Image (spheres, rainbow, N blue to C red):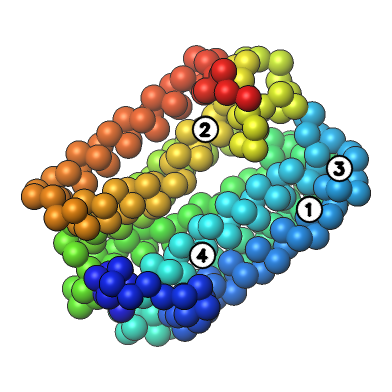
Amino acid sequence: MTIQATLDHPASGRRLLLEAFRDEPRFASATLLLVLAIIPTLFAMALDGRTLNGVSVWSKPLKFEVALAVYFGTLAWFARWVSPEARASRGYRLFSGIVVSCVTAEMLWIVGAAAFGVASHFNVASPLMAALYGLMGLFAVTLTSAAPLYGVLIHRHRGNGLNPTLRLALTTGLGLTFVLTVLVAGFMASGQSHLIGGNGSDAEGLAFMGWARDGGDLRVAHFFASHAMHVIPAFGLLVAMLGIKHGRAAVAAFSAAFIAFVVYVFAEALLGQPFLAVVG
């Protein structure tokens, strides 16, 4: 289905779901399972009063379930613009299976840590936990690598009917998601906390997101970096719909501005400055 057809004849939620399972059944299944996992996690939060770093021990599993569901749901939807031949290839099927295995291991690790009331991230209290933390970092890079692969495959498939402006926005956003996320997350994982300065607790963080309001928080840059695959394509879609001249140049300029913004919030965190400090 072309982007023009999608805009002219919006599909129902059921149709979109069926198309996602048809085009990329592994990522669509992972999305569904992650969404379903949110339900028992919410029950656990309601029944289990234990906290870690000032917030519920189940807060991290919930955030990862939501974030990864959005990630895999987006890829499952983008799969329509990858050629059927590429999706049917043995190498692609093997890779997508590995990616789903990595996210499964990640979630088992995070949920398991929550169940035992210990930290899943920055936990190097023992050689075993340090080794697991490093292994999960490798898994995280592997699952994130699906984004640039999709960027390359969408770029190569010239018969997908995409507007050239939107094609550039998709490939750029997917590529930047990997590059920016790996750089920010890699730096964050090399330290001892996502917080810089402040009281060192997540208890008084920004509503819903949990970002620190009294010091720097590297999760802000991580969040925006991982959503390049949404922000830049959304801008490209808007430019394409409005028929703006030099649309590809506009996407390139916006992408550069987005990179600058991620660098800014990253530097802000390193300086111990909060993001949206006055917002409750």
Q: Residues within 10 Å of mark 2 (few under 14, many from 20)?
A: many
Q: Secondary structure at mark 1?
A: helix
Q: Using residue 144 as the reference point, say whether residue 254 is left or right of it.
A: left
User: Which of 156/94 is in front?
Assistant: 156
Identify the mark at residue 117; answer none if there is no mark: 3
> Do tag 4 and tag 1 residues touch (Cβ < 8 Å)?
no
Q: Nearer the viewer, mark 4 or mark 3?
A: 4
**Which amino acid, by three-letter code, is at mark 2?**
Val
Marks 1 and 3, the one that precedes in the sequence? 1
The residue at 80%/39% (across/down) is 56
The residue at 45%/65% (across/down) is 75
Q: Position of residue 143 (x, y in %)?
A: 52, 59
> Do tag 2 and tag 4 residues touch (Cβ < 8 Å)?
no
User: Which of 68/102 is in front?
Assistant: 68
Marks 3 and 2, the one that precedes in the sequence? 3
Residue at label 4? Answer: 73
Marks 2 and 4, the one that precedes in the sequence? 4
In the image, farthest residue toward the left: 245
Q: Nearer the viewer, mark 3 or mark 2?
A: 2
Residue at label 2? Answer: 220
The residue at 9%/48% (across/down) is 246
Q: Using residue 183 as the reference point, say whether residue 69 is left or right of it.
A: right
> How far apart are labels 2 and 4 at the CA level?
22 Å
Q: Secondary structure at mark 4?
A: helix
Q: Nearer the viewer, mark 4 or mark 1?
A: 1
Image quarter where the N terminus lies is bottom left
**Which amino acid, by three-letter code, is at mark 4?**
Gly
Marks 2 and 1, the one that precedes in the sequence? 1
> How far apart are labels 1 and 3 at the CA level?
16 Å
